[in-house]
Amino acid sequence: MTGEELARYRVKGEMTRWFERKMDAEQISERRIYMRKVLQINEKLSSLPCDVLDASRLYRVGNGYLYEDPKGYEFYLSDNKVTQEETEFRRIRSMMPFEFLDCTGADFDWNIYKTDASQQKALMSSYIVNFEKFREKGMGLYIYSGVKGSGKTMLSCCLLNEIGKRYTVGTKFCNVLDFLEMTKKGYSGGDKDVAALYDASLLVLDDIGVQMGKEWVDTVLYRLVNSRYTNRLPTIYTSNLPVEGLNIDDRVTDRIESTTYFVRLPDEPVRQQERQKAKEKLMEEIKNSL
C-alpha cells in the first residue's frame, strides 16, 4: 500500500480504535513521510510528533484533505491556498458580531448540550468540507431552535469563518432587523451595503421570523431571498422558529425550504450557561489573586 492509502488508517497500538491497521516499520515510515508532506499546508499541523501522527488519520476529500486527530476531531485542509491576508480581509468585512469574529469550528462545544447533537455536528462538518458542491447548487442551511441563546448565531459565525479560511468566497453576516433598517428611506449607508448582501457568495441572515408581519417587510425580504435563489447563492438562516412557523410571505418560505438543509439545535439556553461559567471563572480568579 502507498503512503496515501496507509494514512487512511491509524497505526494499530495497544488500544482498539476505529480505522486501525497493523503496519510494519517500513509502512509506518512511508505513512509518516506522506502525512508530513501533506500537513505542510497547515502551520499548526506541520510538525506533529510521531506518536500523534500514528494515532491520526488523513485522507483526500474533494479539493483538500480531512485530518482526524487522535481524539477524533476533524480538520479540513484546503488545496485552494487561501492566504491569511485574504481570510482576515473577508472576516473583518463580513459584518458579523464582534464577539464571534475569531470563532472557528473548534470553539463551538457540541458537548455542552445535554441531548445528543452528533447528527447536527456531522452535518456542519459535511457542509464545510463539501462547501463547493453545496455552493454549485445554491444550498444553504436553516439553523433553528425553540429557545433563545441556543448557539445559533455563534454556530453560523463559526461556519462563515471556517469556510472563509478554506475557499475564495465573499462572506457577509446581517441580522434581519438590521437589513430592514438598511432598506428604509434615509439610511445613511447607501445602496452598496444592501448590494453586498445580494452579491455575497455566502450570507448569514440572522434571527429571521420575529420581526415579520408587514407587507413592506415581505416585499424587501422576498427581493433579497429570491435574488439569491435565482443566482444560486447559498444562504444560512438562523431562527427561533421552524420554517413553517415563520409569519412571512409563502413565496419566501418556499425559497428557503427548497435551498436549505434544516439543522435543529437542542432547545437549551447554552448561552446563559456559558456566561454563568465565565462569571464564576472570573470570580474564582479574583479570589485566588487576593
Image (spheres, helix red, strand yellow):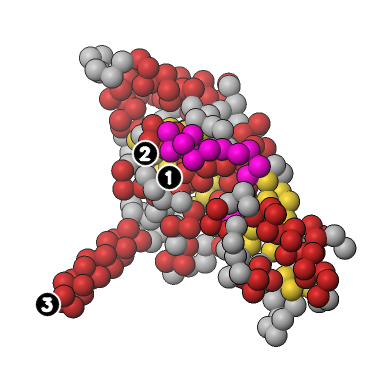
CA distance separating discs 3 and 2:
38 Å
Q: Write down the quadrant of residue 150 in the picture.
A: bottom left
CA distance separating discs 1 and 2:
7 Å
Residue denoted by label 2: 96
191 inside magenta stretch? no
In the rendered view, tell whether residue 110 sits above or below residue 201: below
Residue type at mark 3 is Leu
| Most foreground residue, 94 or 275 | 94
The magenta stretch is 75-89
Answer with left or right where residue 154 lies relative to residue 281: right
**Mark 1 against mark 3, which lies toward the viewer?**
3
Q: Do tag 1 and tag 2 residues touch (Cβ < 8 Å)?
A: yes
Quadrant location of the C terminus? bottom left
The first of marks 3 and 2 along the sequence is 2
The first of marks 1 and 2 along the sequence is 2
Residue denoted by label 1: 157
How many other residues sit within 10 Å of disc 2, few (<14), some (14-19) or many (≥20)? many
Residue type at mark 1 is Cys
Residue denoted by label 3: 290
Q: Secondary structure at mark 1?
A: helix
Residue type at mark 2 is Met
In the rendered view, tell whether residue 51 sits above or below residue 175: below
**Location of residue 169 in the rendering, given as x and y in whole percent from the top left corner:** 54, 32
Q: Secondary structure at mark 2?
A: loop
